[in-house]
Amino acid sequence: MKYGVAVNGVPWSELFSNATEIAANPAGTRTAATVQLEDLGQANIEKFQKGVFTVAIDGTPWKQKFVNVWKKTFNTAGDRLAAEVRLNLYDYTIAVDGTPWNETFSSVWQPTFHPTKNTVLAPVRADGKWTLAEDGKAIWGTKFFQLWHQMVSPNQTNIAAIVAPQFGRWTMAIDGVPWYATFGEMLVEPVFSPSGSRLAALGKENGKWHVMLDGDIWKNSFDMAWQPVFSPNGQYVAAKVEVNGKFSLAVNDCLWKRTCDACWDPIFSPCGEKILCRTLENGTYYRRVIPVQDIVR
């Protein structure tokens, strides 16, 4: 049995003993996967430690083999790829276009490409703590109990990531500086404003969801909340929320008075002063365009 990737029903020309962790470039024109180049017998530890895995792009494997290969990312142009790799039982690093970084670490997370510099960013663990590295070199002086989901602001001036400054406490860090407020259960869905000057995320504490904006936590809490949405000018931030089994919208920590059986993510007008609200109420679907000030009172 051989494995690979099929694109629009057409499989790669070369197949492998195993194929996992599929990735595609942003344009959808190229595909990659972790592939196993050699068969392994049961409990063949010696052969496993020599490395039988690599990355195949459009069916063509990298020349170097690794003990393990995990998450991978194409750059925007689709002509470069970076992946988490394991060199031996103890050393991990990032491989870019088949060549591993010179630096090794006790663990790494999924790499990303800087959108303009085309450098590779990745969370790395050394001396028991996590930080952010660029092309193998640590660029944040601060170290954390955990760090992942790095993201470059739209204006390319800042880098943010989800971090744990304390064990079991989560927040956002911008350029290595963590926000003061933290959450004990999780922090997800970070998003920059279109200008890159503001940042929002969702945090969960004691079973309730909160919106955190620029380091401050909204006073309202929710049974569920979805990724925040910024207005084009960044003045407003809205989110779809659920309270007591009903759905609604919240804007700048103000709740829309209308509650619904279902609700979809809000959409701001280009000027940012109106908002499209799509809801289901008593079996009827509604599309309302209302002034933001109807919610922000």
Image: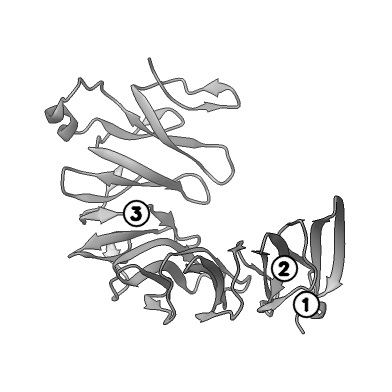
Assign the C terminus to one quadrant of the image. Answer: bottom right
Q: What residue type is labelled 2?
A: Leu
For disc 3, the neighbor class at 10 Å (few under 14, some 14 to 19, many from 20) is many
- Asked if marks 1 and 2 touch (Cβ < 8 Å), the reply is yes
Residue under label 2, please give it: 249
The Cα–Cα distance between marks 3 and 2, rounded to whole angstroms, is 34 Å
Left or right of residue 243, residue 281 in this image: right
Left or right of residue 9, residue 14 in this image: left
> In the image, what residue occupies the spot 16% across and 48% down?
90
Task: From the image, state whether disc 1 or disc 3 is nearer to you.
Answer: 1
Q: In terms of image quadrants, where is residue 159?
A: bottom left
The Cα–Cα distance between marks 1 and 2, rounded to whole angstroms, is 8 Å
116 or 86: nearer the viewer: 86
Residue under label 1, please give it: 295
Q: What residue type is labelled 3?
A: Trp
Numbered tag placed on residue 109 in the rendering: 3
Q: Which colour scheme is used?
A: one colour
> In the image, what residue occupies the spot 28% across and 76% down?
141
Residue at the left extreme, as displayed:
46
